[in-house]
Image (cartoon, rainbow, N blue to C red):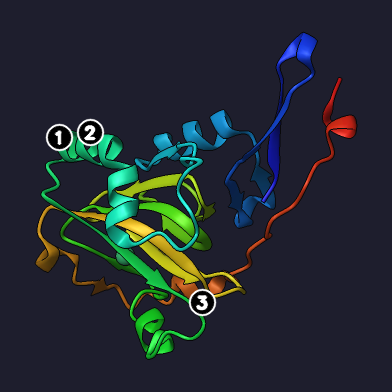
Amino acid sequence: MPHRVRDYGAGRTWELIAVAVLRIPDENRSLREHDEVRDYLAGIGIDYEHWECPADLTSDASADQVLSAYSEQVEKLKRQGGYVTADVIDVNADTPGLDAMLAKFNIEHTHDEDEVRYIVAGRGLFHIHPQHGPVVAIEVEAGDLIRVPRGTLHWFDLCGDRRIRAIRLFQDKSGWTPHYTSSGVDRNYEPVCLGPRYIPPQTAAK
Ligand SMILES: [Fe+2]
């Protein structure tokens, strides 16, 4: 996943900011600028934001510590979307039953409630099949917030490292049962993650 580089001027302080990659396979193109990704997704009804991760949140933080670190943002989202509960999902390659879990969500489906995920660690790949326009693949990683509204056709894959930790928000957990379309559309798209990439400041600077 590419990184945007900010130049703060005289101090020449560089900050690397992860930016989600949005691919449109049917048009053989990708969007890599944060605002372009956000605006394209907004045009197909998907909310996307990038929050900076708190510097004091360690990789071994408990679920409660994660929720506490993001309490301000989580409460804001709850107010905006009518979400009543939040939890933290944490899976990795060693998680028992991981393949069975993934098999529930890597084929085209909808839910009766929004799918809201803030990625704390790891990566994942959402495919969105909008009502109008081509299928898009959005690769999310730490700092990315995505809201897939209820009724949206979509599917989800982990990336090669099979690791993701994310805050989930729910209006009603029972509404999160997948409804499968059996369209087979998902089989037309490879679950390809581009992975972390690094743009050295000297080549990104003007
Ligand atoms: Fe889903």
Q: Nearer the viewer, mark 3 or mark 1?
A: 1
Residue located at (48% from left, 71% from top): 157
Tell me which corner region of the image, top left, top right, bottom left or bottom right, holds residue 102: bottom left
In the picture as drawn, the residue positioned furthest to the right comes out as 202
Disc 3 to disc 2, how far (Cα)? 37 Å
User: Is residue 123 found left or right of 8 in the rendered image?
Assistant: left
Q: Nearer the viewer, mark 3 or mark 2?
A: 2
**Mark 3 Cα-neighbour bin, 10 Å: few <14, some 14–19, many ≥20:** few
Q: Tell me the kind of residue under disc 3.
A: Arg
In the picture as drawn, the residue positioned furthest to the top comes out as 10
Q: Tag on residue 79?
A: 1
Q: Is residue 168 above or below residue 146?
A: below
SS label for mark 2: helix
User: Is residue 9 found left or right of 78 in the rendered image?
Assistant: right
Tell me which corner region of the image, top left, top right, bottom left or bottom right, holds residue 182: bottom left
Residue located at (34% from left, 40% from top): 45
> Which residue does the numbered mark 2 point to in the structure image?
76
Q: Tell me the kind of residue under disc 2.
A: Lys
Q: Tell me the kind of residue under disc 1.
A: Arg
